[in-house]
Amino acid sequence: MSMIRRSNVFDPFSLDLFDPFDGFPFGSGSSSGSSSLFPSFPRTSSSETAAFAGARIDWKETPEAHVFKADVPGLMKEEVKVEVEDGNVLQISGERNKEHEEKTDTWHRVERSGGKFLRRFRLPENARTEQIKASMENGVLTVTVPKEEAKKPEVKSIQISG
């Protein structure tokens, strides 16, 4: 196990998945010495990890809505899914397929990742999930979640006797 890590466990955009059991004979998913007492967890390849972490998403709140913008360059709208789970969890997922590799091709550099990505966001109580709209333009997915109007407090005047 290398003591130098290129990633920071506190960096949400890190491309590594931290495995606290790396180097132990159990639980790390490695085939050597896996114990039957501890379950083995599947490991992902570095390209899958990069694609999973590569979906960069901004979330801003305006007076009227919550707006999510996701960079999904090279994907068509049919390759991206926008769903609401459990009534208040916005899920954005998709898959970027790797380019078909010919036996005669010589690759000099491979930097674009392929694989699946998935991001989830718990929406606030004022989100109107039944009115969510999504659009995609120039590799940017925009998801708009309208907000309920803030209820104005009802003020009732009380007569003072006496």
Image (spheres, grey):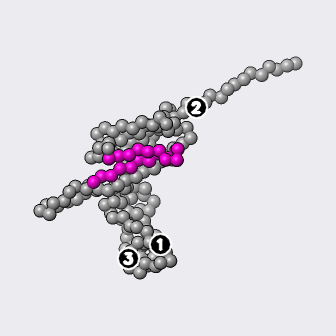
- Measuring 42% from the left and 58% from the top, which residue is drawn there? 11
Describe the element under mark 1 as helix, strand or loop.
loop
Eyeballing the image, is 80 above or below 132? below
Badge 2 or badge 3: first in the primary sequence = 3
Q: Which span is picked out in magenta?
A: 79-97
Mark 1 crowdedness (10 Å alpha carbons): few <14, some 14-19, many ≥20: few
Residue 71, image x, y percentages: 34, 45
Q: Quadrant of the C terminus?
A: top right
> What residue did someone put label 1 on?
39
Q: What number of labels is visible?
A: 3
* Image-quadrant location for residue 156: top right
Eyeballing the image, is 131 above or below 99? above
For marks 2 and 3, give the CA distance.
Answer: 56 Å
Residue 142, image x, y percentages: 38, 39
Describe the element under mark 2 as helix, strand or loop.
loop
Amino acid tagged 3: Ser
Residue that extends furthest to the bottom in the rendered view of this protein? 33
> What residue did someone put label 3 on?
31
- Measuring 49% from the left and 36% from the top, which residue is drawn there? 130
Our reading of the magenta stretch's main secondary structure is: strand
Amino acid tagged 1: Pro
> What residue did someone put label 2 on?
150
For marks 1 and 3, give the CA distance.
Answer: 12 Å
Badge 1 or badge 3: first in the primary sequence = 3
